[in-house]
Image (spheres, helix red, strand yellow):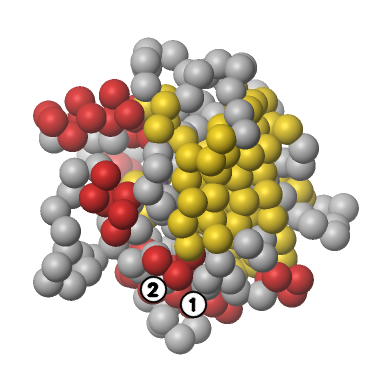
């Protein structure tokens, strides 16, 4: 019997240094950084589910009367990110009749690690941004019903929206303050960072037990109550006190 592991493929490959790609590799998605000409290259996009009690309630989750459940995470592909300064154009995605907005504080990591302690977790943070975790709610609801993965409800093209990254050096570590979203000038979401069930340091520490974090990772930290449907033409403005604002148009 042939042992395929020791066969020639590996040996006949050219040296790694000499290898060319069969097509140009994709550049990472990137976000502008306030006060800098350089941009922030995005690696992975992590998201925390149900991190505000009022939003967990509106999604029909049972009240966590006997203490918090551990945080849970899902992901979007790094290239699902769209963002920047000024008005961000977001294409209304296919195969949904119920595209929802979720305004969130986004954490941008400047370094990484595994099994990071809560006490040192903030040291990994490069900066913060305002973001939108766009969700095909109907596809997500069907996935929940069937016990299927959430990916196609959460991780579609342009599903992760983010504004300019504000470096920690300029904004510190915001842990309280208003987080809000208007659609066509009408307030839809209005919460406070202080209501996060799992704080940013806890989130980083917990997530780093599951995966090794690295520079370029973004973490969407959950949304307060008031999520709802969007339509083509809608103009969204969101903000987090002490971090900044974001403007997007659904096209
Ligand atoms: Mn979310």
Q: Please tell me which residue lies in front, 42 or 236.
A: 236
Near mark 1 (Cα within 10 A), the count class, few <14, some 14-19 or many ≥20, is many
Q: CA distance from mark 1 to mark 2?
A: 8 Å
Relative placement, left or right, of 31 versus 56 is right
Q: Tell me if residue 88 comes above or below residue 123 in the rendering.
A: above
Task: Tell me the residue at 76%/48% (across/down).
Answer: 32
Under circle 1, the secondary element is helix
Task: Tell me the residue at 49%/51% (across/down).
Answer: 190
Provide residue 105's location: percent of width, then percent of height: 53, 56
> Mark on residue 121?
1
Provide residue 80's location: percent of width, then percent of height: 53, 34
Q: Earlier in the sequence, mark 1 or mark 2?
A: 1
Task: Tell me the residue at 45%/70% (across/down).
Answer: 194
Q: Please tell me which residue lies in front, 28 or 226.
A: 226
Q: Tell me if residue 231 comes above or below residue 68 in the rendering.
A: above
Whether the residues at callouts 1 and 2 have beta carbons within 8 Å, the answer is: yes
């Amino acid at each position: 019997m042939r042992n395929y592991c020791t066969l020639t493929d590996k040996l006949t490959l050219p040296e790694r240094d000499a290898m060319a790609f069969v097509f140009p590799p994709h550049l990472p998605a990137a976000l502008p950084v306030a006060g800098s000409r350089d941009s922030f290259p995005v690696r992975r996009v992590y998201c925390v589910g149900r991190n505000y009690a009022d939003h967990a309630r509106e999604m029909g989750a049972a009240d966590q009367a006997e203490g918090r459940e551990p945080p849970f995470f899902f992901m979007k592909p790094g290239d699902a990110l769209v963002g920047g300064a000024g008005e961000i154009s977001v294409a209304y995605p296919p195969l949904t009749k119920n595209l929802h907005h979720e305004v969130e504080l986004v954490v941008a990591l400047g370094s990484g690690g595994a099994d990071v302690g809560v006490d040192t977790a903030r040291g990994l943070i490069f900066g913060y941004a305002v973001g939108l975790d766009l969700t095909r709610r109907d596809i997500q609801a069907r996935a929940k019903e069937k016990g299927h993965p959430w990916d196609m409800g959460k991780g579609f093209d342009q599903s992760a929206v983010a504004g300019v990254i504000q470096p920690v050096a300029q904004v510190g570590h915001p842990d309280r303050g208003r987080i809000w979203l208007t659609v066509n000038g009408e307030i839809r979401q209005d919460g406070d960072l202080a209501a996060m069930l799992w704080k940013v340091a806890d989130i980083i520490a917990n997530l780093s037990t599951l995966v090794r974090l690295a520079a370029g990772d973004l973490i969407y930290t959950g949304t307060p109550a008031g999520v709802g449907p969007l339509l083509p033409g809608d103009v969204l403005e969101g903000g987090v006190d002490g971090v900044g604002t974001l403007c997007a148009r659904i096209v």
